[in-house]
Amino acid sequence: RIAYVNGQYVAHAQAAVHIEDRGYQFADGVYEVCEIRGGHLVDERRHVERLVRSLGEIRIALPMPLAALKVVLRETIRRNRVRNGFVYLQVTRGVARRDHYFPDPSTPPSLVVTARAVDPAKGEAVAGEGIAVITAPDNRWERVDIKTVGLLPNVLAKQAAKEAGAREAWFVDREGRITEGGSTNAWIVTPEGRLVTRQADNGILRGITRTVMLQVAEQLQLTVEERAFTVAEALAAREAFVTSATNFATPVVRIDGLPIGDGRPGAVARALRENFHSFAEITP
Ligand code: PMP
């Protein structure tokens, strides 16, 4: 495997950034994960747009012009011969002697890109079964709309899920409403058949998959409500599911050990999953 690290393509096993990288010391950086399908990037434009926004919100300069960045993504995919999988990109505020203040503006941001093949059959099998989720208090900061590498609450919540035999943790705010998953957006279908997902304010990451699925839902003439929903509402839902670039739409069949709907993957999640890639933008 090959990784891109600050201007060079290097063996993945030897790929490294300096110990004084601000990503390492302060989680002072942002990232993106983009699907590769048939050797092509899925929704690259939206992912790059979100990257630019995340960088702007924490005042890190673009590490290189966007056209060059797109070449690096493609070259990393090509060198790893990935047909189906994911590309990971991380930008940090660069390497500087540890000091909370921003480093001198001449300090170049660090850019790392990796690409990994994933067997699509594995995700299909998981989606066919459905996943269990647990709920966990949303103890994150108030700017989770920024896709920062500061993911400690997400790591702890997802590990708690794993130890409880579940795959994802749904964060719950102080009002008892679900915000999103540790690495996914959260959705339910009400008993009346309305599709509900939280409004994309600063309390969730505006998932690219979420945005595309809203378009799919419109095309399927589903009634959509972008609003907060409570744990009680989720437990009483006809179905529940998660979305992300790595999950597309994956049904949730249990929340905190309790079955959702009939305890099997729901029809809305399946329809959204099946139609996702015809609405996503696939670029050469
Ligand atoms: N919320 C969080 C906290 C995430 O980490 C992710 C995945 N990066 C998502 C939602 C889903 O975003 P996307 O659809 O862009 O993958």
Image (cartoon, helix red, strand yellow):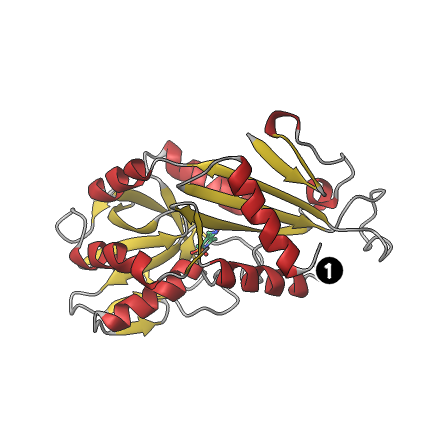
- For badge 1, the amino acid type reads Ala
Residue occupying the point 58% across, 62% down: 143
Q: Is residue 242 left or right of residue 179?
A: left
Q: Is residue 214 left or right of residue 156?
A: left
Q: Is residue 231 visible?
A: no
Residue 22 appears at what percent x and percent y? 74, 45
Residue occupying the point 60% across, 43% down: 113
Residue 195 appears at what percent x and percent y? 25, 67
Quadrant of the frame with the N terminus: top right
Residue lying at the far left of the rendered structure: 262
Element type at marker 1? loop
Residue occupying the point 52% across, 40% down: 78
Residue 247 appears at what percent x and percent y? 35, 48
Asked if ligand 1 lies within 8 A of label 1, the reply is no
User: How many numbered badges does the structure rendering display?
Assistant: 1
Residue 114 appears in which quarter of the rendering?
A: top right
Residue behind mark 1: 61
Q: Is residue 6 left or right of residue 256?
A: right
Q: Is residue 223 visible?
A: yes
Q: Quadrant of ligand 1?
A: bottom left
Residue lying at the far top of the rendered structure: 13
Residue 112 appears at what percent x and percent y? 64, 43
> 204 and 69: which one is in front?
69
> 174 and 36: which one is in front?
36
Q: Is residue 79 above or below residue 62?
A: above
> 89 and 27: which one is in front?
89
10 Å crowding of disc 1: few (<14), some (14-19), many (20+): some
